[in-house]
Image (spheres, grey):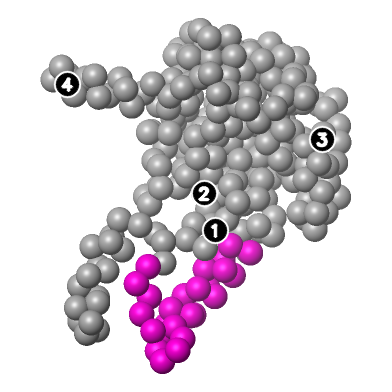
Amino acid sequence: MSGSVDRDFWAPLRSSTQARIGLGRAGDGLPTARVLEFRAAHAAARDAVHQPLDVPALAADVERLGLGAPIVVESCVRDRGEYLRRPDLGRLPADLSAVPAVGADVGVVLADGLSPRALTEHGVALLEAIVAALPRHLSVATPVIATSARVALGDHIGAALGVRTLLVLIGERPGLSVADSLGVYLTHEPRPGRADAERNCVSNIHPPEGLGYAAAAAVVAGLVDGARRLGRSGVDLKDTTRDDRLDSATTGEL
């Protein structure tokens, strides 16, 4: 197959995926440009993991949303190296004395996770979209910023807040195609010891290539409503927003 035909074959497929496909070859190896692209992507992923979260800047941006001055919570991790070696410590809070028991309907934790860059770039905009998508009668607790955090740290924070449903906005593990992807983990009636099967996740949030803020917020709002009606989250709770859109399309309501 000639080079021109090969490029024509792969071009439409590349437009629909961020995966590395049809890279070509130079002798027995990859073309130099492809090797350099891979190394740059790998470096970006490593940088995203180790980039420190600018907590004061993030707190100032969150406070502008009118939800109150964020509370800052740290995990038991001492440094980033320990965070990567000891996931268990990232699930435990160092001190929750600053977290008030507000008893709101919804609590929000903004966690750095494995990509503080993702939280920096998308966290505030996604939080704003989620608050706008939630029903007005639901109360939202003052946001909490959690550093060196794993998802389960939110269980301790949610229990301390006394919220009914907790949302953890957290930087996802960087890959070689995306280093700034954000995820939202929903846990109904949060408390320490909740299993992963008792959560719901909306992932791959990183517009413009990934899921957009409004679309993600619509799914989150639907899951919050479903969890409140079902009385639990996790494997029994399904995203029905896509079904609703399909039903509207068939009835001509879109």
Inspect this view and state whether residue 67 appears. Answer: no
Q: Name the residue under label 4.
A: 250
Q: Which of marks 2 and 3 is nearer the N terminus?
A: 3
Mark 3 or 4: the one toward you: 4
* Amino acid, disc 3: Leu
Q: Position of residue 110 (x, y in %)?
A: 63, 36
Please tell me how crowded label 1 is: few (under 14), some (14-19), or many (20+) other residues with Cα within 10 Å.
Answer: some
Q: Where on the picture, by quarter, is residue 239?
A: top left
Q: Mark 2 points at which residue?
A: 181
- Disc 4 to disc 1, C-alpha distance: 38 Å
Please tell me how crowded label 3 is: few (under 14), some (14-19), or many (20+) other residues with Cα within 10 Å.
Answer: many
Q: Mark 1 points at which residue?
A: 175
Q: Earlier in the sequence, mark 3 or mark 1?
A: 3
Residue 74 to residue 8: above or below: above
- Disc 2 to disc 1, C-alpha distance: 9 Å
Which residue appears farthest toward the bottom when viewing the image? 27
Task: Give the magenta-colored segment's residue range.
Answer: 21-46
Q: Are marks 2 and 1 in contact (CB under 8 Å)?
A: yes
Mark 4 or 2: the one toward you: 4
Q: Where on the picture, by quarter, is residue 139?
A: top right
Residue 104 to residue 174: above or below: above
What secondary structure is found at the residue carrying circle 4? helix
Q: Where on the picture, by quarter, is residue 142?
A: top right
Relative placement, left or right, of 179 versus 79 is left
- Disc 4 to disc 2, C-alpha distance: 33 Å
Q: Earlier in the sequence, mark 2 or mark 1?
A: 1
- Disc 3 to disc 1, C-alpha distance: 26 Å
Which dot marks residue 92?
3
Please tell me how crowded label 4 is: few (under 14), some (14-19), or many (20+) other residues with Cα within 10 Å.
Answer: few
Q: Does the magenta stretch include residue 140?
A: no
